[in-house]
Amino acid sequence: MGDISESAAAYTSRFLESFYSDNLIEAFRLLVQAGRLYTESVLGAEALRLLNEKPEAKTVRLNVTSADKCLQMLSDYDSWTLLRDENSIQTWSQEANGDFFVRAEMTIHKPVFPVLALFSEVDLLKQL
């Protein structure tokens, strides 16, 4: 049992290393793999038990679930209402479960980081 626990602990360490290296795709892959191994071996069951004790596992599952929902919502073009289409900028809206979403499509001929900074600093829009 000691070898199995050590292997499960090593597996959990790989998961945590992926998580703290901001490699959420690899961390999620390890979670899924542990779930598959759970039914096949004692090692998988131990690894899954150890992973489920970690708050990082809950965070990864939540982030992947949220990203998946976001991608599904963005790819369902029929559920969006076009609000404006001028100057090569399209603005769309959608209401879902009491939440209101806005999506814009445009081509920006500038580096992406200053544009993203503008979105995170909404108060700067007042100056434009």
Image: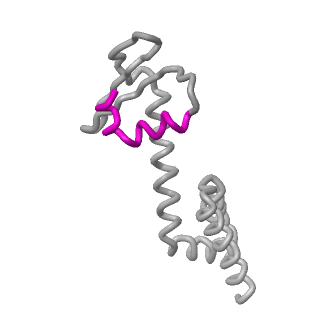
State left or right for residue 63 relative to residue 10: left
Q: Farthest bottom residue? A: 2
Residue 113 visible within the image: yes
Q: Which residues are magenta?
A: 112-128
State left or right for residue 20 relative to residue 1: left
Quadrant showing the C terminus:
top left
* Nearer-the-camera pick, 35 or 59: 59
Displayed quadrant of residue 87: top left
Residue 113 higher or lower than 21, as above or below: above
* Residue 124, horizontal then vertical, whole percent: 34, 36
Q: Farthest left residue? A: 98
Residue 91 higher or lower than 51, as above or below: above
* Nearer-the-camera pick, 87 or 27: 87
Colour scheme in use: one colour
Quadrant showing the N terminus:
bottom right
Magenta stretch prevailing secondary structure: helix
- Total number of numbered labels? 0
The residue lying at 69 percent from left, 68 percent from top is 40
The residue lying at 49 percent from left, 44 percent from top is 67
* Nearer-the-camera pick, 93 or 38: 93
